[in-house]
Amino acid sequence: MAMIRSFTVGNGDMFYIKHDSDNFTIIDCQLFGDHKEWLVDELIQESKGKGIVRFISTHPDEDHLEGIEYLDERMPIQNFYVVKNDANKSNESESFKHYKKLRDGDKAFYVHKGCNRRWMNQGDDERKSAGINILWPDLENEDFKEALRASTDGLEFNNTSLVARYSLSGGVSFLWLGDLEKPFMEKIFDHIELKETTVVFAPHHGRDSGKLPNKWLDKLKPKIIVIGEAPSRHLNYYTGYNTITQNNAGDITFIPENGKIHCYSSWESYGKRDWLKDEGKPNEEFGVRDLDYYIGTLVV
């Protein structure tokens, strides 16, 4: 059974997918302070027995790569999925230097729209596919090329973000968009193939500057939008959609099962959501941490 975890790590992003196949995927990292050690402990524990462990870097901003050197030291990164770039910064942190080492090294796989990779989206007799497809970037798109040039010049990095979609049997799916900004998403709408997606992690941590355009939402038809940890005054709360706000929920866990998603929060105060069905799913049924609290089940 699969498990998707979204962590509360300050104003940044970090996720993992424990696939229902021989795959384990980490998406971005922000490791610092008290949570750094226990979070990597959890990654090591949950990835045990998985034949393929991959790291997907959405884009080279500090709040998506901080502490990557610590992660690589404790849990060596063998498969680094990244948009090919030559991003530079005038004042490079140790984490950004380590990102560049991974980006330019022999562990890197450069992703782009429609790319194929054994065990990412192609299965064989040895191992099933992870079910991950890359919807963006289109390397020939002029708006993306402009964003890439800005990152090379050390000016801006958000719009070099990839878009990754994870789909499972039973019609359940998840979407990550890094820190794409609203004007950029408006520009590329006709150049990206969007499908209905069950859970969407709002770009740019849920900020209004990264608010999904209405025509994107009309295509995606999300059943849940996860809003990240940006300061509340900067957030867009997606009126009319069911949302889970990380500022209030803490770490969020999703357990897909037969066309349903059981949802958990690490903060008891968040409580059950009235738009989710209460199926009384105890944590121990799925091996969810004792610190997490059941908030309801989405029936897809």
Image (cartoon, helix red, strand yellow):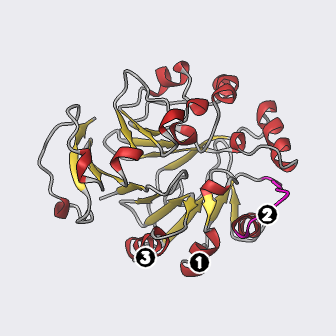
Say which element carries label 3: helix
Q: Is residue 112 magenta?
A: no
For discs 1 and 2, the disc positioned in front in the rendered view: 2
Question: Which residue sits furthest front?
Answer: 233
Q: Which amino acid does label 3 sit on?
A: Asp
Query: Residue at coordinates 31% horizontally, 42% vertically from top-left?
Result: 170
Which residues lie in the magenta part? 85-94
Q: Which amino acid does label 2 sit on?
A: Glu
Instruction: Name the residue tied to disc 2.
Output: 92
Q: Which amino acid does label 1 sit on?
A: Pro
Residue 109 drawn above or below residue 149: below
Q: Is residue 143 left or right of residue 248?
A: right
Say which element carries label 2: loop
User: Is residue 193 in view?
Assistant: no
Q: Is tag 2's residue or tag 3's residue first in the polypeptide sequence?
A: 3
Instruction: Name the residue tied to disc 3.
Output: 41
> In whole angstroms, how far apart are the C-alphas of marks 1 and 2?
22 Å
Q: Does the magenta stretch include residue 89?
A: yes
Image-quadrant location for residue 186: top right
| Viewer-side residue, 2 vs 262 | 262
Instruction: Name the residue tied to disc 1.
Output: 76
Verify CB contact (< 8 Å) between mark 3 and mark 1. Answer: no
Label 3 packing within 10 angstroms: few (<14), some (14-19), many (20+): some
For discs 2 and 3, the disc positioned in front in the rendered view: 2
